Image: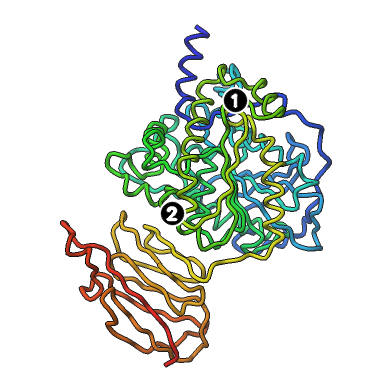
Amino acid sequence: MRKRLMGIVSAVVAGSAVLITTGAHALAAEPAAPPAPSAERIDALPAPFADWNVSLSPKVDEPGALLLSYDSPALGQRSDNTVYLPTSYSETGAKSPTLYYLHGTVVSALDNPVTDPVAAQESLLEMVGSGGGDKQTKLQGFAEQRDQAQFVVVAPDTNAQNSWCESCLWIDGQRDLLPEAPPVTAKTVPAETVLYQELIPLTEQVLNVRTDRGGRGISGFSMGAVGALIQAFRHPDRFAYTAAISGPYDFVDDTFWRNWVDVVGYMRDQGYGVSVTDLPRWRNFNPADLVGNFAGSGSPLMISAGDVCAPPTDAAGAEDCADDPALRNPAASLIESQMRRNNDEHIADIANAGVEAKQVRYSGIHGAYNHRIYPEVIVPGANAAFAAEPVTTDSFGYRTQDRTFSVWGYDVAAEHTDTQFLALENARHDGHAFSLRGTGVVDALTPASFTAGQTYRVSYSSAAGQNRTEDLTADPQGRLRLDVDLDDPAYATKADALALFGHAPGYARIEVTQA
């Protein structure tokens, strides 16, 4: 019976994409108590935070950690988040940077304390069981590194009994025709909304932390690593450091990972269908399709994967491999080997996209080396990134299927189909020149780089040459608003003549000069 039960549960976990291990490395000396944050900050919270019943207190089950809890309007439930303050943190001194950490998959069928006796049969199952986000967060050893880290760590969704982000990929889910049926399917949640409209602004109100891009970073493990890449590539102007621990870079064109995403239901459960019918929509969240967005950020990127102990590369790796043998954990070994293959195959593509990524290889299966990579790679890397002045390129490119987006001071709204990418190309950060490629009517608001009330001449050019000019007056914020109909034949490209259905994306170059 036990053998049969373990076979069934192992099959469930084999579709989880986040098999992780504990071991001797999980044990550490009890860290010192964290610096005490000021209760006055919570008492003086402005709207809307004042209505969220916010609390910040020591985390009972984790010395050296704090628990930031609040009533989430987006989730409609209480949200628990773990906070690790560095010993250098001060309530009144210099503001600290913040690194946000995203956990990996939690198996919906096991995300219930009732299943704990079953999950406890195997350490891997226990880590993806109830409150798996909390267990995975502890793998990094955040509390033990507060002396070395010069930044705050905030880890969302760390309720020890239940996780709200099970297979959410840390994106905003959308309602579709498929019913939500936990535990058969994971919960559809607005994870990205929680990050940017709730957790990040709340953290910046409750703690004495920086609010600029140079003082913010994002990291994650497994599914959370994919989530970190997605968020860094969708919002390159928000983060100065990105670290992805054991996550695939491409889950659309890679056969193994495309099938894995289908089996686990990451995109399906968030309302984005299955690969057979909805693969074009998946590309809006696939890091490999968005990496060009990150090229203009000038921010460091770290990606890592284990070597599945074949063979261990150093003494510390040998110890991890002895604690968590690959042969005893075939599913965890399979997952990590496929992540390693995926990253190895695409590291050159990342460089060709203009992104300088640091690839790190450690010995170990999925989750076994997390306790090493955080202190040895992420802490020094993030410390250096936060201490440096953020740099950007002279111009940038950005593409998305979102109908509205904001990036590098531009606010853009477009009318186009759900699977159509709209691209900003060769866009100057001062808004004086940029290109639009896509379909539909585009409303673009430039960065606030102009003199309020002054008139400027805006030139619109197609691929074939200049089409028209108009004079626009900068608004009180120093921004210009302009509209471009990319479906207008004047902006057609040569590719349009080859389109079998509809038309190819239009192209317009916009340049602003003094009127």
Label 2 environment density (alpha carbons within 10 Å; few <14, some 14–19, many ≥20): many
Relative horizontal placement of residue 22, taking residue 1 as reference (left or right): right
Quadrant position of the C terminus in the picture = bottom left
Question: Residue at label 1?
Answer: 309
Above-or-below relation of 225 to 107: below
Q: Secondary structure at mark 2?
A: helix
Secondary structure at numbered mark 1: loop
**Residue 440 or residue 75, whichever sits in front:** 440
Give residue 221's position: percent from left, percent from top: 57, 39
The kind of residue tagged 1 is: Cys
- Select label 2 or label 1 by which is in front: 1
Whole-percent x, y for residue 88 in the image:
81, 53
Q: Which residue is mark 2?
A: 290
Residue 11 percent location from the top left of the image: 45, 21
Location of residue 108 with respect to 44 vertically, above or below: above
Which of 160 and 281 lies nearest the eye of the viewer? 281
Question: Percent x, y for residue 405?
Answer: 43, 64
